[in-house]
Image (cartoon, rainbow, N blue to C red):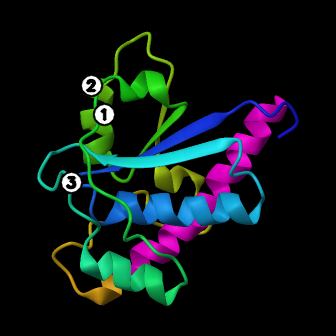
């Protein structure tokens, strides 16, 4: 990114313990690999307050750990309307959360609202499925989807910053 303008990204799912903390951790790793951590800030939140203050689900943490990432320092929080002023991008994991976020966002707030899988390459899924009630295979699939979408999102941000 040529102009070194800071960019902020918020990932959002329902409870902020499975998908969005995984997305935060994976995207943070991708950004670090591209040596852009000084200009891109990353956070995650949930549309509901079910798990505020809790760490990510143990299965999300275990999956991340097998891939070399540590999510243990993250804590769930609920998205707030002011987040649409704090962040440039608010990224929803699925259509339901997208709709909740769209209803919360004010007309004049700056954040761009997107579905995360819109940035993924060769996936048929338009949404990141909630693995909460499934087994570890669901968390593995979510991780893979999030990895793909993270690369695409970073590409998008870089192109946007260059005016492409």
Residue drawn at the location 46% of the way across and 75% of the way down:
70
Foreground mark, 1 or 3, reads 3
What SS does tag 2 mark?
Answer: helix
Return the x and y of residue 85 as percentages of the image width and height: 45, 21
Residue drawn at the location 65% of the way across and 64% of the way down:
30
Return the x and y of residue 155 as percentages of the image width and height: 73, 51
Figure quadrant of residue 130? bottom left
Return the x and y of residue 126 as percentages of the image width and height: 43, 57
Q: CA distance from mark 1 to mark 2?
A: 5 Å
| Within-10-Å neighbours for mark 2: few <14, some 14–19, many 20+ | some
| Residue 28 showing in the rendered view | yes
What SS does tag 3 mark?
Answer: loop
**Among numbered discs 1 and 3, the one appearing first in the sequence:** 3
Q: CA distance from mark 2 to mark 3?
A: 22 Å
- The vertical placement of 42 against 69, above or below, is above
| Residue 123 showing in the rendered view | no
Q: Quadrant of the C terminus?
A: top right
* Total number of numbered discs in the rendering: 3
Q: CA distance from mark 1 to mark 3?
A: 20 Å
Circle 3 residue: 53
Q: Quadrant of the N terminus?
A: top right
Contact flag, marks 1 and 3 (Cβ < 8 Å): no
Residue farthest toward the front in the current orientation of the protein: 73
Foreground mark, 2 or 3, reads 3
Residue drawn at the location 59% of the way across and 53% of the way down:
119
Q: Which residues are magenta?
A: 139-164
**Among numbered discs 2 and 3, the one appearing first in the sequence:** 3
Instruction: Tell me which secondary structure the magenta stretch mostly adopts.
Output: helix
Give residue 104's mark.
2
| Within-10-Å neighbours for mark 3: few <14, some 14–19, many 20+ | some
From the viewer's perspective, tell me whether residue 105 is left or right of residue 120.
left
Circle 1 residue: 101
């Amino acid at each position: 990114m040529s102009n070194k303008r800071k960019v902020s990204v918020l990932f959002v799912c329902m409870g902020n313990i499975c998908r969005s903390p995984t997305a935060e951790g994976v995207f943070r790793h991708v950004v670090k690999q591209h040596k852009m951590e000084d200009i891109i800030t990353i956070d995650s939140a949930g549309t509901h307050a079910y798990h505020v203050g809790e760490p990510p689900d143990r299965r999300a943490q275990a999956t991340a750990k097998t891939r070399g990432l540590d999510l243990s320092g993250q804590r769930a929080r609920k998205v707030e309307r002011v987040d649409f002023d704090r962040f440039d991008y608010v990224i929803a994991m699925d259509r339901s959360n997208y709709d909740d976020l769209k209803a919360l966002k004010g007309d004049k707030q700056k954040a761009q609202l997107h579905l995360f899988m819109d940035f993924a390459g060769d996936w048929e899924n338009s949404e990141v499925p909630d693995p909460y009630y499934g087994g570890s295979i669901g968390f593995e699939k979510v991780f893979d989807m999030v990895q793909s979408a993270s690369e695409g999102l970073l590409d998008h941000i870089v192109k946007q910053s260059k005016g492409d």
